[in-house]
């Protein structure tokens, strides 16, 4: 069985994005990937980019494959960060195949309301 062309990209890597009062948090399941195979970047225009590549299994001349289901290839996901994101303080960590990217938020200044006395 020739597996060339049967490995698919895993561009549909699923990423969760939640917002807490303190930060935007992104979580991606990236099993079998090492942190050296993943890139997290913030581009101009407040664009968070998460990318990586999973290598396919080496094919030996005498190997006979019966099934190939694990995906390999490159992935790239991009997210436009909101105005309140502190893009200079982004942190990322990878543990047990889960990438977590934390983007702290700016403190939203609540407008103080000052009552004005009406004379007359």
Image (cartoon, rainbow, N blue to C red):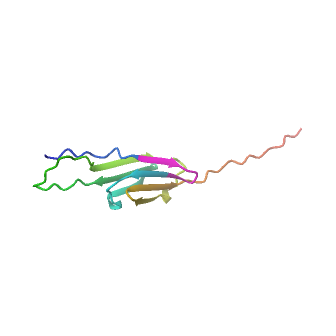
- Does residue 64 appear anywhere in the picture? yes
Instruction: Decide if residue 107 is on the left or right side of residue 44.
Output: right
Residue sitting farthest toward the top: 120
Residue sitting farthest toward the right: 120
Instruction: Decide if residue 86 is on the left or right side of residue 4.
Output: right
Coordinates of residue 36 in the picture (x, y in percent): 33, 61
Coordinates of residue 63 in the picture (x, y in percent): 13, 54
The residue lying toward the viewer, choosing from 52 and 68, is: 68
Q: Residue at x 87, y 40 (%)?
A: 119
- Looking at the rendering, the stretch of residues picked out in magenta corresponds to 15-24
Coordinates of residue 9 in the picture (x, y in percent): 28, 46
Q: Residue at x 45, y 47 (%)?
A: 16
Instruction: Decide if residue 8 is on the left or right side of residue 83.
Output: left
Image quadrant for the C terminus?
Answer: top right
Label total for image: 0
Q: Residue at x 45, y 51 (%)?
A: 26
Instruction: Decide if residue 46 is on the left or right side of residue 30.
Output: right
Coordinates of residue 80 in the picture (x, y in percent): 45, 46
Dominant secondary structure (helix, strand or loop) of the stretch shown in magenta: strand
Residue sitting farthest toward the front: 66
The residue lying toward the viewer, choosing from 18 and 105, is: 18
- Does residue 81 appear anywhere in the picture? no
| Residue 73 covered by magenta stretch | no
């Amino acid at each position: 069985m020739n597996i060339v062309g049967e490995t698919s990209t895993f561009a549909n890597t699923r990423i969760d994005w939640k917002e807490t009062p303190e930060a935007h948090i992104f979580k991606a399941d990236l099993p079998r990937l090492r942190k050296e195979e993943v890139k997290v970047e913030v581009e101009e225009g407040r664009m968070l980019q998460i990318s990586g590549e999973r290598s396919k299994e080496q094919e030996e001349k005498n190997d006979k494959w019966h099934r190939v289901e694990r995906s390999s290839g490159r992935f790239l996901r991009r997210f436009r960060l909101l105005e309140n994101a502190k893009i200079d303080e982004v942190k990322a960590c990878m543990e047990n195949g889960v990438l977590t990217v934390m983007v702290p938020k700016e403190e939203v200044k609540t407008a103080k309301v000052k009552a004005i006395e009406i004379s007359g």
